[in-house]
Amino acid sequence: MSRTARTSPRRKDAVTALAFLAPALVAIGLLRIVPFVGAAWSTLYERVGVGLLAEQKFAGLHNYATLFSDPLFRGTLVRTVVFNLVINPVQIALAMCVALLMTRAVPLRGLWRTAVFIPCTIPLVGSSIAWGVALRGDGPVNGILRAIGVGSQPFFTSPQQALASIMLVASWVGIGYWMLFLIGGLNDVSAELYEAASMDGANAWRTFWSITLPSMRRPLLFVLVADTVANFVLFVPVQLLTNGGPQESTTLLMFDAYRRTYTYSQPNLGATSTLVLTVIMLAIVAVQFRLLRDEDAQ
């Protein structure tokens, strides 16, 4: 068979694959890459005057210097990183616990799975409003706390409690969603491994650390990457419930970029804040993918 005859089917397959991938590639290019390049380019300019339509002039790295010399932005940067260092492990650990429970032979397992997943079907706006009502001063949660003698808590109005309350709202939605991926991973773990561990007399804790957790490394890393991205760009609960307050205690980078762009009419600084957020997020995701690549190399 001639070389031309061998390469023709490959070329045909490549053209077919490209035809199927083209809509997705075009969408990614137009909706992701082009806006990102535009935002990165605008960080090098500043506006002469006030407003989104003001004239721009080249400013080099002035926007970056302005942001990093702002103590409020530095506080927001640290707060965003700490927020993710806390909420991501907590969400994944709880999702893993629920997934382990939902793969056991518990009564009404399907009903419990549905109950845990229902928050994911509610738009985040609706969930935020519901939690805003539940946790306000005269809401049902504070009513229960007063009934048991704890007293009312200023969930969204206290600088010490507001960010934790935002974590609660985000986790209420996230745990059920990530649980589904982890249940899929748990179902793929070979039953023979569990049988071998049982024959060796391994207890439940030893079985989890030696079999379940190593077998779940890939699903866990996927959930970790996706959860990290989702929480870095968390915006709706912050805007609806606290508007970044009180005392900037819930201002995260995504909200900071929005507020600089649309509230303060500083789109170049807003784009710079977004780019800083993207770089930090990509760096963390790159580390997580590196962990995944190390697993493949073993």
Image (cartoon, helix red, strand yellow):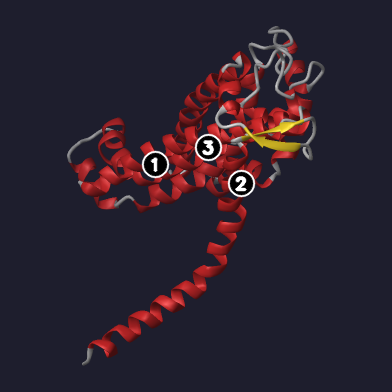
Sequence order check: which comes first, mark 1 or mark 3? 1
- Cα distance in 3D space between marks 1 and 2: 31 Å
Helix or strand or loop: what does disc 3 sit on?
helix
Label 3 CA crowd tier, 10 Å (few <14, some 14–19, many 20+):
some
Looking at the rendered image, the quarter that the N terminus falls into is bottom left
Q: Residues within 10 Å of mark 2 (few under 14, many from 20)?
A: few
Which residue was labeled with disc 1? 221
Residue positioned 63% across, 39% down in the render? 42
Cα distance between the residues tagged 1 and 3: 19 Å
> Foreground residue, 71 or 130?
71
Q: Earlier in the sequence, mark 1 or mark 2?
A: 2
Nearest the viewer among 295 and 143 is 295
**Residue 241, percent from left and from top:** 74, 26
**Residue 148 in view here:** yes
SS class of the residue under badge 1?
helix
The label number, if any, that marks residue 278 in the structure image:
3
Whole-angstrom CA distance, mark 3 to mark 2, is: 14 Å
* Residue that appears at 60% across and 28% down: 63
Q: Amino acid at mark 3?
A: Thr
Furthest residue toward right: 138
- Is residue 216 among what the camera can see? no
Q: Number of numbered discs present? A: 3
Q: Is 90 positioned to the left or the right of 186 in the image?
A: right
Amino acid type shown at disc 1: Leu
Q: Which residue is mark 2?
A: 38
In the rendered view, would you say 278 is above or below 28?
Answer: above
Left or right: 86 with respect to 146?
Answer: left
Mark nearest the camera among 3 and 2 is 2
What's the amino acid at mark 2?
Gly
